[in-house]
Image: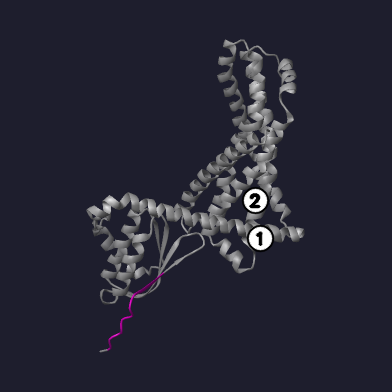
Amino acid sequence: MTYLKLQQAQIEKTQNNSGSILFRCQGDWTAKALQNVLRYLEKEAGILFNMSVQWDVSGVGKVDSAGIMLYIHYHDLLKLQHCTVELTGARSEYQNLYQLLRSHVSQQAVSKPGLLSRLLLPFTNIGKSTENLWRDINDFLTFIGEHSAALLTSLRHPSSIRYASIVKNIEEAGVRALPIVALTSCLIGVVITYQSALQLQKFGANIFIVDMIGISVTRELAPLITAIVVAGRTGSSYTAQLGAMTITEEISAMRTMGFEPHRFLVLPRIIALMIVMPLLILFADVIGIAGGMIVSNIHLNISYAEFIHRLQHVLDIKHLWIGLFKGPFFAWLIAITGCFRGFQVASNTESLGRYTTISVVNAIFLVIACDALFSVIFTELGL
């Protein structure tokens, strides 16, 4: 009789550029060969929190119920730690055993942490969140560096810029966004006029509604509302498009063939949005003021001619330029955030939805923070 020698179970953890974790398993995952893996997983799996984890078991030889139960235990543990877990490379002969054991093991079977661990859990979560935030910032700065290198290379070789892709993105991000930008801008003008008119009527200062609408819309509201709409519409689409390409491994294929993704995918999107955003803001200025003018005529009996005449005298051109000046900065923040999150998507659809949501939230936060910074700077400069 011939006895086949067992190979010790092995597991290797790697982290890709998107921040997701890959556990590559090899050897025999049987009761007599799991000692090294037990110690390794006990140390490594406990520090993973809110991450995307992929188990590649394509290199595993023999497997028994002990190996399957070990995977189920750490699968449930990672789920409790808010990780997304994906199993790849499992052979069909082991899937029936997994289904059988899985049907008799519930997620509550994971051992509950002790009292001290539960008391320290909030601090543990804060520490892990801080670590994830720090890693995100480092990855984001690295992404900006790669984007800057691609931009400099393109400026040195203008013929390499993908002008057709830029034009296509201008149509997607600009022309097709006109209806939603027009609707939101008009509503903003209407709301401001209605809310302000009630106060101005008490003092007989109806005509000053023109000052309020003209300055607030052109200087602050039109740029900010347009940026928020674009972040929700275009920034999320950038993340979804690049995330889908990551899932289907198109981006990996581009790198293998020698095509730089930043030059072919990121740069055209950023340039297009930086061109489009000031034009959208100018369009929002016109629509927002027009909405306020109509309501002023209906509610405050200010004629259109009187409104336009007053607007010409009170609306300094600097307010219009300040609003337009913010456009390229907001566009860069939205586009770079959307593309960065798109590259972070792991190979599953759950990750795609998660990073698309994160992209929109991050972009809106950065736009508001940038707008606050501009307000302080312009105020200090006396503008």
At label 2, which amino acid type do we have? Arg
The magenta segment is 2-12
Residue 242 coordinates in the image, percent (x, y): 57, 54
Residue at the spot of label 1: 149
Q: Secondary structure at mark 2?
A: helix
Q: Vertical placement of 207 versus 103: above or below? A: above
For label 2, the crowd category at 10 Å Cα-Cα, with few meaning under 14, some 14 to 19 and many 20 or more, is: many
Residue 269: numbered disc: 2
> Looking at the image, can residue 73 be seen?
yes
Residue 227 coordinates in the image, percent (x, y): 60, 39
Q: Can you tell which quarter of the image residue 264 is in? A: bottom right
Work out whether residue 98 or residue 110 is closer to the camera in this orientation and state it.
Answer: 110
Q: Secondary structure at mark 1?
A: helix
Q: Can you tell which quarter of the image residue 72 is in? A: bottom left
Residue drawn at x 54%, y 41% as measured from the top left: 364
Residue drawn at x 71%, y 25% as measured from the top left: 315
Q: Residue furthest bottom?
A: 1
Rendered-image quadrant of the C terminus: top right
Q: Vertical placement of 383 versus 304: above or below? A: below
At label 1, which amino acid type do we have? Ala
Work out whether residue 85 or residue 376 is closer to the camera in this orientation and state it.
Answer: 376
Residue 4 coordinates in the image, percent (x, y): 30, 85
Residue drawn at x 63%, y 55% as measured from the top left: 266
